[in-house]
Image: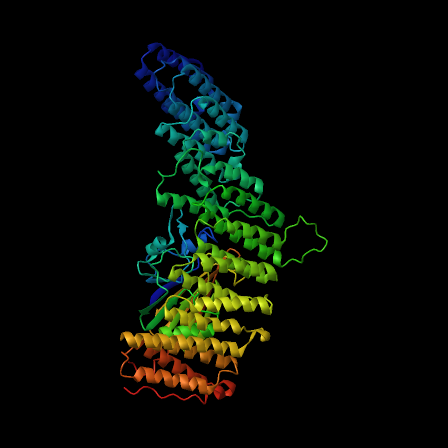
Amino acid sequence: MYKDIVLPRVLEQVVNCKDELAQFYLMDCIIQVFPDEYHLQTLDVLLGACPQLQPSVDIKTVLSQLMERLSHYAASSAEVLPEFLQVEAFAKLSNAIGRVIEAQPDMPTLGVVTLYSSLLTFTLHVHPDRLDYADQVLGACVRKLSGKGKIEDSKATKQVVALLSAPLEKYNDIMTALKLSNYPRVLEYLDVPTIRVMATVIIQSIMKNGTRISTSDKVEALFELIKGLIKDSDGTSNDKLDEDDFKEEQNSVARLIQMFYNDDPEEMLKIIETVRKHILAGGPKRLPFTVPPLVFCSLKLVRQLQGQEENPFGDDASTTPKKIFQLLNQIIETLSGIPVPELALQLYLQCAEAANDCELEPVAYEFFTQAYILYEEEISDSRAQITCIHLIIGTLQRMHVFGVENRDTLTHKATGYSAKLLKKPDQCRAVYACSHLFWVEDHDNMKDGERVLLCLKRALRIANAAQQMANAARGSTGSVMLFIEILNKYLYFFEKGNPQITVASIQSLIELIMNEMQSDSTTSDPAAEAFLASTMRYVQFQKQKGGAVGEKYEPIKYEPIKA
Amino acid sequence: MVLVLALGDLHIPHRAPDLPAKFKSMLVPGKIQHIICTGNLSIKVSLFLSNSIEVHDYLKTLCPDLHITRGEYDEDTRYPETKTLTIGQFKLGLCHGHQVIPWGDLDSLAMLQRQLDVDILVTGHTHQFTAYKHEGGVVINPGSATGAYSSITYDVNPSFVLMDIDGLRVVVYVYELIDGEVKVDKIDFKKTASIHTAH
C-alpha cells in the first residue's frame, strides 16, 4: 500500500509545493521515518522524484542520507543482501546520482564527491566482493571531476580522502584497492600536499594490517600511488613542508620497504631492483632514509642464499650473493656527496661482514677499502671518528676470510687511525682494542702473541704521554684509569695463553699503577681505585679456582693500598 | 620488588618496521619502575592506532624513569656512551656494546663491568640474548626487541628482559618471540654481600 498509494501521493505533494526548505525537510522525513525495506522496494519512485525537486535543494544530503541508511541496513544482517540484488539497488542509485549531477551542472565539487563517497560506502557494504562496482563508482567520479583541474576546496579534499580511504578500511588489503583501476586516477585530482597525506594513509593501512607486498609489479603499482612521497613532483618546492613532517613521511616509506618480501630469491631481487629504481629519484634529502632499509633487505637475501650451494651449471641470470653485493655497492654509493659519510661507512662494514660469511674475499676487501676511504676523507668530527674506529676494529676482528697480506694492510691502517685520534685517552683505548686484531679465537693461525704485546706496549706509551701532559698541566690524572684498563688487557691475553705476556710484565704494570696512585702529585680518583680493586678481586678469584688457571695466576702478587 | 625493563637494538625503521604487536600488548604503562635501553632505537614506533611517535617518547609513556646509552645508529647525541645507576641493593651498568671489542666477548664485557664497578652489566649490539654469571656479577644482553638483522647473530628472535630486583636477589625474565608465540624463561641471581672494604 505504501508503494502504490502513500508514497506517490506524498511525493506529488512534495514536488508540487516548490518550496526548497519544505522539500528538503519532507524528503528527509520520508527517508528517516519509513523502514528501510520500504525504501528498497520503492527506490524507483523515490529516486524518480529527486530530479524534479527545486535545484537549490541540497539533494546530495538527501541522497547521502538514503544511502547511509541502506548501508547500515545491509550491514545489519547478511540475510537482507539478496533483496538489494533483487531490486538492483546499485544500478538505480548510481543512475540517480548521475542524473542529479547532470541536472545541476553548477554543483560544486564537494557535492559531487560527497555523493560518490556515499555511493562507494554503500557499494562496499552491500557488494563487498564486486570490485567492478566499486571501480565503476570511482570511474564515474573521475569523469565528473575531469576538466575541473586540481581540487582546491578543503572540504572537497577531505571528502576525496574519505572516498579513497573507504576501500582501504573495507578491504584491509592495499592490493585489493590497487585492483580498482580508477583508484590512482582519483588521486590525480588532489593537490600535492593531500596526495602526500593520502600516501601516508595508504602506508599506515599496510602497516596496521601487516600486509606483505610480494611481487615487483605490486611494488611498482604501490610506488606509483605514493610517488608524492618518493620524489618531488615537477615544479613544486618542498620548502613549505615542516622538517619533522618530512622526516615522519620518509620514515614511513622506510618502514614500508621492510614489508616487501618474497621467499623466491629471483622475485626478491626484482623487488629490490624496483625499489632501488624508485628511491634513486628521491634525491639527497630522501636517500639517507630509504637506502638503509633497502640495504638490509638485500643483506637478508644474501643470508638466505648463503646456505644454498652455488649451482655450477646455473645460468648467468640467476641470483647470487655476488650479484647482490654488486648491487649493494651501487646502492650505498648513491649516498656519497650528500653527505652522510658515517652512515655509508656503517653500511659498507655491514656488507663486508656479510661478504666474509660468504667467503668472498675480494668483495669484502673492496667494502673495507670504501669504508677506509670515507674514514680518511670525510669523517672529521672527533666523536664520529671514535665510533667509526670502534666499528672498523670490531668488524675487522671478526673477519676470517682475508689472506695474510690483505689482513695486514687493513690492520696496519686501522692501528694507524687509532693512534691518530684527537685525544690521547681515545688513542690509547683504540690502540689496545687493536690488540684483538692479532688474536682471534678458533683460528690458531690468527694468534700472534708478539704483535698483541706490541699493541699493548704502544697503548702504554700513549698512556704515559697522556700522564706527562696531565702532570705538566697539573690537571687530574685520569690516565691511571688507562693503565688499569691496559692491565686488564694484559690479564686477558695472559689467561688466553699468549706466551709473550709474562708474569713479570704484569707485575711491573701493577707496580707502576700502585706508584701512580700513591704518588703525591696525583689527586685521588675513586673510579680508578674501584677499578683496581675489582681487578685485583678478579685475580684473587682466578687464583682460588685452582687447577691450571689457579696455577697461572698464583705468582701474581698484590698489596692493597694502605689508607 | 622493583621491575626493570631492559631492551634495545630496535633499529626502527632501518632494519625493522615496528615492535612486535605481542610485545606492545604486554608492555603497558604503570607496571614498570625503570627502563634501561642499550641503544639503537633509531627512530619511530607505532601505537595501535597507527600514530607514530618517537621510540624514546613511547618508552617514556611506559615509565618516566628511562635510561638510554648511545648505539652507533642513534642520531641523538645526548645519549651517553655508558651509564650507571643504583636500584635497591644493585649497581647497574649500561652500555650499547659496540665499543667493547671483541663484540660479544664475555671476558671483555667483564672487564667493562669491573671498570664501571657494577653488579649487573646490561649491553646489546649482538642482538643475541645472553645472561652470564661470573664471580664479579652478571652480564645481560636483552637481544633485539624487534628481531632486527644482525651481522653477528643469525636467526634473531625478538626479545627483551624484565628484571625483578628484590633485596639481594634478582630474577631475570627473558621474553622471546618464537614462531609467533611469546616464550618466557627465567634465571635467578643472588648477590653475596661484598667483602672488600668500601672506600
Q: Position of residue A297 (x, y in %)?
A: 53, 51
Left or right, residue A309 beside residue A223: right
- Name the residue rendered at 34%, 84% in the picture: A514
Q: Quadrant of the C terminus of chain A?
A: bottom left
Q: Is residue A560 left or right of residue A377?
A: left
- Kindly indicate the quadrant of the structure image that contains residue B26: bottom left
Q: Work out whether residue A451 or residue A531 is closer to the camera in this orientation and state it.
A: A451
- Tell me the quadrant of the picture where the N terminus of chain A can be found: top left
Pick the front one: B99 or B140: B99
Residue A447, given in percent of the width and then of the height, sits at 55, 76
Snapshot colouring: rainbow
Residue A241 % position (x, y) = 36, 40
Q: Is residue B153 above or below residue A151?
A: below
Q: Is residue B92 above or below residue B46?
A: below
Task: From this view, report whether residue A274 is shown above or below residue A36.
Answer: below
Instruction: Find residue B196 and report its horizontal and vertical position in percent.
Output: 33, 83
Q: Residue furthest right?
A: A313
Q: Is residue A69 visible?
A: no
Along the horizontal axis of the image, is A188 left or right of A479? right
Report the residue at 48% width, 58% height from top. Answer: B158
Which image quarter: residue B65? Answer: bottom left
Q: Residue at (31%, 74%) from the top-left corner?
A: A470
Whether A74 is drawn above or below A510: the answer is: above
The residue most toward the top is A16
